[in-house]
Image (cartoon, helix red, strand yellow):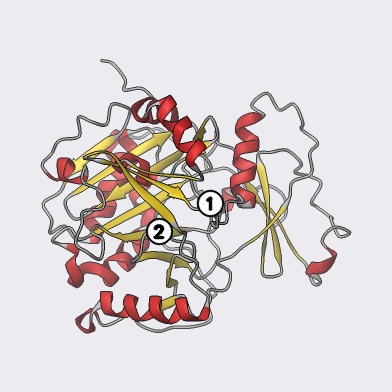
C-alpha cells in the first residue's frame, strides 16, 4: 500500500442504525496471512499450572525478565511499585515518541527524523509462548511486574491504534471461560492509542490474574466496581456492572455501545492507521534506503519494522482517540485519555485500579507531590455536566 488510504465516509442514520453499522464493522475479522494453526490449551488441564511451568522454564533460561520492585500501600486500595536500581528503565521507541509528541504540542521541530522501531511481537520467543491459534499467540509478559500476566497477540500485524474486534473477545474467552473467568478471577485490559500508556504498537490484549500467588487481592478497588460503585472514578468514563454469565459476543457488543456513548465510534479501520508501507530486502541498510520514508517526518508518525516490512503508522492522538478498557466478568469500564503522562510519570489501564509503577524513589516522591487523584484527573477528561 502506498500513500494514504481512502477515508470512510459516514451518512446520516438513526442512533440504532449507526450502532448496528459499527457492530458489523468490528465483528468482521481482517483477512490474515498466517503460518500456523493449533488449539488453545485444554483448560481442564489447568491454565495456571501451564503458566507456572512456563515461568519456571523461561526464568531458568533467562527469557523472562521480571522487574524487581518494592511494593508500597499508599492506602487500603492504592498500591505503588518502585523499580529496583537493577531494572531496565529505558523507554521503548514508542514511549519516547509519545513523550516527544506531548512535549511538542506546538510542533517546534517538524523536521525531526523519526526513529525506527522494531516490532518485538513479530516473532514470539518460544520460551514465552504459552499457546497459539490460527490468528493469535498467547505469551507471558517478558518484562513483568506481576506474575500470571499474559498477552494475547495478533499473529499478523495489527496496530494498537485499532479498536477490538469480536474475534479478539472470543479468543480471550476461549482461553479463560472455564478457568475462573465467571467468578471474576481474571482481569482483561487494552491500552488503545498513543496516550493510553501502551508501550508497543503491535495489537495485544493483556490478561492478568486478580490475585497474587499468596491469595492477596491485587486490585482492592475492583470490589467497589463489583458492587456497582464507580463513584471513585471522578473523571469521564463509561461503566457497566455485569451479570457474570455474558458471552464474549455480548461483551463485545456492550464494549461497542460504550464506545458509542463516549463518542468514539468504531468506523476507523486498519488501513487508516498504516500510511505507507514498503518491503525492505536488507534491513541493515535502512538508513540509506529511505524511499517513501521522508514523507512522514513529524512526531505524529512512527516507523515500524515488521519483519521485512517498513510501516509508517499514524500516531496522531487527535485523529485516533486514546482510551483504556478494563473488564472482568463482573464489570466493564472505558476511560478516554487526554494525556499519556503527568510530569513525565506514565500510566496504562492499571492506574485506574489504583496500581502505579515508578522507576525510582524520587519519582515516587514526585507522584506523591502531584497527588494520585490529581494525576488521574490530569490524564483524563472531566465529567461532562448536564
For the N terminus, which image quadrant? bottom right
Q: Nearer the viewer, residue 358 or 234?
A: 358
The residue lying at 40 percent from left, 58 percent from top is 205
Query: Residue 330: percent from the left, percent from the top?
Result: 16, 51
Identify the residue position indicated by label 1 in the image. 199
Mark number for residue 205?
2
Please give left or right for residue 323 compared with residue 199 in the image: left
The residue lying at 31 percent from left, 65 percent from top is 172
| Secondary structure of the residue carrying numbered label 1 | loop
56 vs 366: above or below: below
Q: Quadrant of residue 382?
A: top left
| Secondary structure of the residue carrying numbered label 2 | strand
Q: Confirm whether residue 133 shows in the render.
A: no
Query: Residue 354: percent from the left, percent from the top?
Result: 31, 40
Query: Residue 199: percent from the left, percent from the top?
Result: 53, 51
For the C terminus, which image quadrant? top left
Please give left or right for residue 332 compared with residue 266 in the image: left
Please give left or right for residue 227 compared with residue 290 in the image: left
The residue lying at 35 percent from left, 35 percent from top is 13
Q: Nearer the viewer, residue 381 or 134?
A: 381
Mark number for residue 273?
none
Amino acid at each position: 500500500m502506498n500513500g494514504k488510504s481512502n477515508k470512510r465516509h459516514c451518512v446520516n442514520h438513526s442512533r440504532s442504525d449507526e450502532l448496528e453499522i459499527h457492530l458489523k464493522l468490528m465483528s468482521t475479522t481482517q483477512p490474515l496471512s498466517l503460518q500456523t494453526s493449533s488449539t488453545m490449551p485444554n483448560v481442564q488441564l489447568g491454565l495456571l499450572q501451564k503458566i507456572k511451568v512456563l515461568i519456571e522454564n523461561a526464568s531458568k533460561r533467562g527469557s523472562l525478565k521480571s522487574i524487581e520492585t518494592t511494593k508500597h500501600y499508599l492506602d487500603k486500595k492504592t498500591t505503588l511499585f518502585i523499580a529496583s536500581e537493577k531494572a531496565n528503565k529505558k523507554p521503548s521507541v514508542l514511549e519516547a515518541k509519545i513523550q516527544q509528541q506531548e512535549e511538542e504540542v506546538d510542533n517546534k521541530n517538524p523536521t525531526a527524523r523519526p526513529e525506527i522501531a522494531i516490532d518485538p511481537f513479530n516473532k514470539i520467543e518460544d520460551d514465552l509462548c504459552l499457546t497459539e491459534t490460527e490468528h493469535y499467540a498467547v505469551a507471558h509478559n517478558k518484562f513483568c511486574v506481576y506474575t500470571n500476566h499474559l498477552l494475547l497477540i495478533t499473529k499478523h500485524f495489527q496496530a494498537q491504534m485499532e479498536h477490538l474486534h469480536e474475534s479478539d473477545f472470543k479468543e480471550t474467552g476461549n482461553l479463560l471461560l472455564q478457568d475462573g473467568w465467571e467468578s471474576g478471577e481474571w482481569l482483561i485490559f487494552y491500552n488503545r492509542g498513543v496516550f493510553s500508556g501502551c508501550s508497543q504498537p503491535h495489537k495485544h490484549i493483556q490478561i492478568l490474574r486478580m490475585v497474587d500467588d499468596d491469595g492477596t487481592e491485587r486490585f482492592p478497588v475492583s470490589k467497589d466496581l463489583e458492587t456497582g460503585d464507580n463513584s471513585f472514578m471522578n473523571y469521564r468514563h463509561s461503566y457497566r456492572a455485569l451479570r457474570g454469565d455474558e458471552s464474549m459476543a455480548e461483551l463485545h457488543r456492550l464494549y461497542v455501545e460504550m464506545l458509542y456513548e463516549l463518542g468514539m465510534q468504531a468506523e476507523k479501520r486498519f488501513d487508516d492507521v498504516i500510511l505507507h508501507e514498503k518491503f525492505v530486502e536488507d534491513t541493515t541498510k535502512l538508513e540509506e534506503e529511505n524511499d517513501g520514508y521522508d514523507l512522514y517526518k513529524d512526531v505524529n508518525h512512527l516507523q515500524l519494522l515488521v519483519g521485512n516490512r517498513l510501516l509508517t503508522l499514524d500516531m496522531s492522538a487527535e485523529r485516533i482517540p486514546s482510551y483504556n478498557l478494563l473488564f472482568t466478568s463482573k464489570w466493564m469500564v472505558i476511560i478516554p485519555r487526554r494525556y499519556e503522562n503527568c510530569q513525565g510519570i506514565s500510566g496504562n489501564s492499571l492506574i485506574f485500579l489504583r496500581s502505579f509503577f515508578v522507576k525510582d524513589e524520587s519519582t515516587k516522591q514526585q507522584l506523591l507531590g502531584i497527588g494520585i487523584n490529581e494525576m488521574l484527573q490530569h490524564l483524563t477528561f472531566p465529567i461532562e455536566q448536564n
